[in-house]
Image: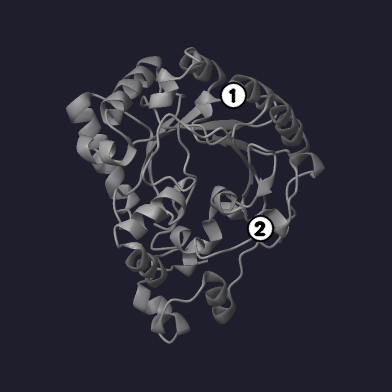
Amino acid sequence: MDHSIRQPEEILAGSPVAAGIKSFGELMTETGLTLVRGDTTTLQINMGLLCNQACRHCHLEAGPQRREIMSAGTVEELIAYSRRGNFLTADITGGAPELNPHLIRLIDGLAPQVKRIMVRSNLTALTDGPQTSLLEFFKERRVVVIASFPSLQPAQTDSQRGSGVFQNSLDSLRRLNALGYGREGGDLELNLVSNPGGAFLPPAQEEAEKRFRRELKTRWGLSFNHLYVFANVPLGRYRNWLDQSGNLESYQQKLVSCFNPAALGGVMCRYQISVSWEGLLYDCDFNLALDLPYGGRKVHVSAMDGPPPIGTPIQIGDHCYACTAGRGFSCGGAICA
């Protein structure tokens, strides 16, 4: 497959989409494209919507007042499923997974089953949460930390994520670096995630990584391994902000006009299965937000003998335009060079 970036006019010339916004399903049908599962190697686990932040861009509307949280019983079901599924990677997210009291048990149970465990952190919950020994535990288990760090500008970060978040995030990065995370030549992986603060698409990932690496080192003496850029998906709190600011229609049109079929081969739903705090299966965390269950019906993790079969159709919606716009993005950042 050609993974080069195609300009919107190259993609949409002569296509019905060029004349106006089509649903993602209509686009797939009219262009003869399909979206089905490949080899599912990643088990993504959403531990709940409880979070110490209420970020403007959050597709799940997680926050301090949410009470949805994974139980100890569901944690055990997931550990058993990881054994049956032979997954290579466990990707733990939330909300803020650090606020779930069963996180340590989940990681301990997953460690013998998978080669790589990642925890997606907002950085402030990592050091200010109730489990104060998490950093040392992560180091001991060689947990990969995927840390939200949207901007190098304090005002922009605080506007998106809450007052004081930028400085607290720097403090957490210093502590991670002091433990050996993000150090060149080390084996403790620290990756950052940046996403736009407004109604626009992210910059090129390679150039953004160079800029973040230079600025963090020069201004604060901090280091990391990789930077991932994500587009904001118009769901949840971010969709509400787009609507209230008068940007919803123009942002949706932007996503449609930048659709890149080359990104379809690398979207996250092709190689991961997402499990909610209730133990229900979804093709991705965005489908979880919309309650579009795997296979079109509620399936509990305890009912799965293994990973979804190769070729299984993926539940799609208009939010899929965000993952396939421009360079596209997956949980590992940009898809196309």
Three-letter amino acid code at disc 1? Leu
- Spot occupied by residue 225 in the image (x, y as percentages of width and height): 38, 33
Residue at x 28%, y 46% (from the top left corner): 208
Residue 231 visible in the snapshot: no
Three-letter amino acid code at disc 2? Arg
Q: Which mark is residue 141?
A: none
Residue at x 78%, y 37% (from the top left corner): 84
Which quadrant of the structure image shows residue 193? top left
Q: Which residue is mark 1?
A: 103
The foreground one among 88 and 44 is: 44
Circles 1 and 2, Cβ within 8 Å, touching? The answer is: no
- Spot occupied by residue 152 in the image (x, y as percentages of width and height): 24, 38
Q: Which residue is mark 2?
A: 37
162 relative position to 132: left or right = left
Q: How many marks?
A: 2
Residue at x 48%, y 13% (from the top left corner): 136
Q: Secondary structure at mark 2?
A: loop
Crowd rating for badge 2 (residues with CA inside 10 Å; few <14, some 14–19, many 20+): many
Earlier-in-chain disc, 1 versus 2: 2
